[in-house]
Amino acid sequence: MTQRTPIVGGNWKMNTNHRTAAELTRELAGGLERVGGVDVFIAPPFPYLLLVGAILRERGSRVVLAAQDVYFEPDGAFTGEVSIPMLQDCHVRSVIVGHSERRHVLGEHNETINRKLRAVLDAGLQGVLCVGETLAQREAGRTDDVNRMQLQECLAGIDAEHAERLVVAYEPVWAIGTGRTATPEDAQNAHHKIRGVLSGLFDEHVASRIRVQYGGSVKGSNALGLFAQGDVDGGLIGGASLKSAEFVQICQAAAQSARGA
Ligand code: PGA
């Protein structure tokens, strides 16, 4: 249950091709047509942004086009990177930053994530900041400290006005792609602490408006239990976002959790 409009994101990661990206988008646009009361975004790989965006527009879909990452400089000699103006050219309105795979597989640090997030919010886009602890950190009882540190460093220099476009995704690293999900109670505890940190960084009113998604092996079958928690405002979905029927079911669960509020 949440007082905020829940938000569900599909992070396609490095999956799909031209054909399957188009198919998935058509199925999602159709399946989500009658699902209201939940904000939905999908983040396809860069090469398919224009394709996916065109299909969403053609279908009149409310699903928001998102990117999985971005670079903070507007242009220049940064081989392989993609800028915010390029994303805006492709009609992208939301950007995921600091995903754990960027942190742990590709070596991204809080300072870089902070620069990316500031650039995204400055440009008027929605920024989805991912935070979360590894298994070793969890077992050492450091979950809340790790989340606090990541939030403090990644949100440095961001003011309350910019925070209106901020979404936080709590994604315990040990739950991502592993089939292991945090229990609804564990998720609620972590989300509640995260909202407390946001209160300290901004203020209580601003923190009460920021949506905190849960991510990590969310499926159609466990979504409602997670989203029913007071501080869990939807989810960031990896594997299950590649199956249209299951992703639609997860979005319906988010809408249902809001109706129960
Ligand atoms: P998963 O990924 O749903 O496949 O666990 C979540 C994420 O990485 O955003």
Image (cartoon, rainbow, N blue to C red):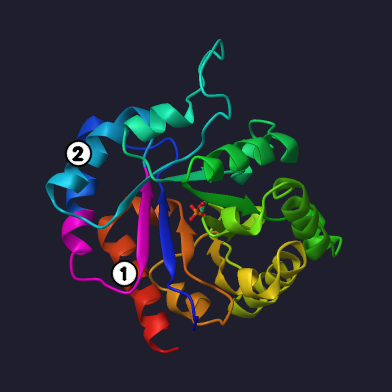
In the image, which residues are magenta?
A: 28-43
Q: From the image, state whether disc 2 or disc 1 is nearer to you.
A: 2
* Residue for badge 2: 54
Question: Which mark is on residue 249?
Answer: 1
Tell me the kind of residue under disc 1: Gln
> Is 29 one of the magenta-colored residues?
yes
| Of 23 and 126, the residue lying toward us | 126
> Is 177 one of the magenta-colored residues?
no
Residue 47 locus on image (x, y percent): 34, 27
Residue 79 locus on image (x, y percent): 53, 13
Direction from residue 27 to residue 97 in the image, left or right: right
Q: Quadrant of residue 48?
A: top left
Q: Residues within 10 Å of mark 1 (few under 14, many from 20)?
A: many
Question: Which mark is on residue 136?
Answer: none
Q: Residue at x 57, y 82 (%)?
A: 230
Residue 173 locus on image (x, y percent): 65, 53
What is the tally of numbered marks visible in this picture?
A: 2
**Where's the C terminus, which quadrant?**
bottom left
Q: Earlier in the sequence, mark 2 or mark 1?
A: 2
Q: Residue at x 55, y 28 (%)?
A: 71
Q: Is 228 situated above or below 234? A: below
Residue 106 locus on image (x, y percent): 64, 30
